[in-house]
């Protein structure tokens, strides 16, 4: 039996200022669909500037949202293919 290997590439882009980091995550699926999600992090005035930490928090939030959108997409496709409402997909 032959197995097919599929790869997805997730892109993350960040914009930052002194107080905020914003992230956009995007994955292009083999069917041509693009799924995008956003994440945000804010630095408290008393905290030292650590841009890497803001990127990690904003990036993680964007990836978490991306994961939830992919689960919803899969759930909707299961429902469409089966013609019925399936059980929720839990993380």
Image (spheres, grey):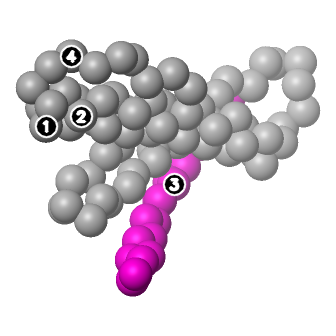
Which residue lies under the disc numbered 4? 85
Q: Quadrant of the C terminus?
A: top right
C-beta proximity under 8 Å, tags 3 and 4: no
Looking at the image, which residue sits at the far front?
A: 1
Check if mark 4's residue and mark 2's residue have beta carbons within 8 Å. no
- Judge whether 73 appears above or below 42 on screen: below
- The residue beneath circle 1 is 81
The label number, if any, that marks residue 78 in the structure image: 2
Is 37 rendered above or below residue 72?
Answer: below
Q: Label 2 to label 3, Cα distance in Å?
A: 28 Å
Question: For residue 19, which quarter of the picture?
Answer: top right
- Residue furthest bottom as drawn: 2
Rendered image quadrant of residue 45: top right
Secondary structure state at the residue bearing disc 3: strand
Q: Say which quarter of the image contains residue 84.
A: top left
* Left or right: 45 in relation to 63: right
The residue that appears at 68% across and 44% down in the rendered structure is 55
Q: Secondary structure at mark 4?
A: loop
Q: Is residue 19 magenta?
A: yes
Chain-order first, disc 3 or disc 1: 3
The answer to whether the residue labelled 1 contacts the one labelled 2, judged by CB atoms less than 8 Å apart, is yes
Label 4: few (<14), some or many (≥20) within 10 Å? few
Number of the label disc, if any, that sits on residue 12: 3
Asked whether disc 2 touches disc 3, contact meaning CB atoms under 8 Å apart, the reply is no
């Amino acid at each position: 039996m032959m197995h097919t290997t599929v790869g997805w590439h997730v892109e993350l882009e960040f914009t930052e200022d002194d107080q905020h980091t914003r992230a956009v995550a995007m994955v292009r699926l083999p069917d041509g669909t693009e799924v995008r999600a956003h994440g945000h992090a804010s630095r408290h005035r008393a905290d030292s500037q650590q841009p890497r930490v803001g990127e990690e928090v904003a990036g993680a939030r964007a990836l978490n949202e991306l994961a939830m959108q992919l689960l919803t997409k899969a759930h909707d496709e299961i429902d469409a293919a089966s013609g019925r409402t399936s059980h929720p997909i839990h993380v």
